[in-house]
Structure formats: C-alpha cells, structure tokens
Image: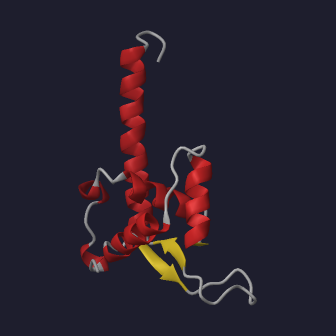
Amino acid sequence: MIDAEASPDPRSLLPLPQAQFHILVALTAGDRHGYAIMGAVEESSGGVVRMGPATLYGTLKKLVDRDLVEESDRRPSSNDDERRRYYRLTGLGQAVCQAESDRLSTLVSIARSNLRPGLA
C-alpha cells in the first residue's frame, strides 16, 4: 500500500488502463459491490464495455494495491448478502479519477478542434 503522507501526484499515475478508469468512474457514484460495478461499467459505456469477473477482480486488486480503491464495511441493508465485498474510492483514487478525466477531456477537445476546425 502507498503511504498516505507520501501520496504521489495523481498525474504521475496516468494514463490509466481502460478497465481501471471504468471502475474508478463507476465508484464515483458511491460504494458498490463487484457485480454492481460490472453493471455500471456496461451501462455507462452503452454496452460497449463488458467486464468479466476475472478482469473486474484482478483490476480491483491492482486498484486496492495502488491505494486508489479500498474495501468498505458499509452495507446498504442489514439483509445484504454477507459474501459481497463492497468497494469505494480513496482520496487518492478520487484525485486520480479527476486527473484522468481532465486529461481525456483535453485530448477530446484537441481531437474535436483538429477534426472540425472553426466549430470547436
């Protein structure tokens, strides 16, 4: 795990692999369990990105190891399945997600400007 006091500059962790960014974006809406993350990724991508369990849980492990995501003890209800593991963004994860969003937004703006001169 990354020492909280020695957290890296979020921009130093960019660019993020697609799966990592999709998971971080899914967690911006709040704590989610694995299958809810998969559903959110599929929904937010209009069905273009479908993440299987191996990709999801392998990527979550990497995000936890990098201190971008952590497991949450919070449960939406007392009768929730105890086997479910919930995840949430850390402060560093939020900063990295914002930095990647900004980076991609800038890139999209450049592409639009170059592809449609005078309309951007």
Q: Quick check: 81 left or right of 7? A: right
Residue drawn where x is 61% and y is 84% of the image? 74
Query: Does residue 30 appear in the picture of this structure?
Result: no
Image coordinates of residue 109 in percent, x first then y, are 41, 28
Query: Does residue 19 appear in the picture of this structure?
Result: yes
User: Toward which corner of the image does residue 73 lie, by quadrant?
Assistant: bottom right
Q: Quick check: 83 left or right of 91? A: right
Count of all numbered marks drawn on residues in the image: 0
Most foreground residue, 49 or 71: 49
Image coordinates of residue 49 in percent, x first then y, are 51, 49
* Residue furthest out toward the top: 118
Image coordinates of residue 29 in percent, x first then y, are 60, 62
Residue drawn where x is 42% and y is 64% of the image? 55
User: Toward which corner of the image does residue 66 lie, by quadrant?
Assistant: bottom left
Residue 57, placed above or below residue 9:
below
User: Toward which corner of the image does residue 45 lie, by quadrant?
Assistant: top right
How is the structure coloured here?
Answer: secondary structure
Q: Quadrant of the N terminus?
A: bottom left
Image coordinates of residue 35 in percent, x first then y, are 59, 69
Residue 76, placed above or below residue 42:
below
Q: Quick check: 35 left or right of 112? A: right
Residue 61, placed above or below residue 17:
below
Residue drawn where x is 40% and y is 11% of the image? 117
Residue drawn where x is 52% and y is 75% of the image? 87
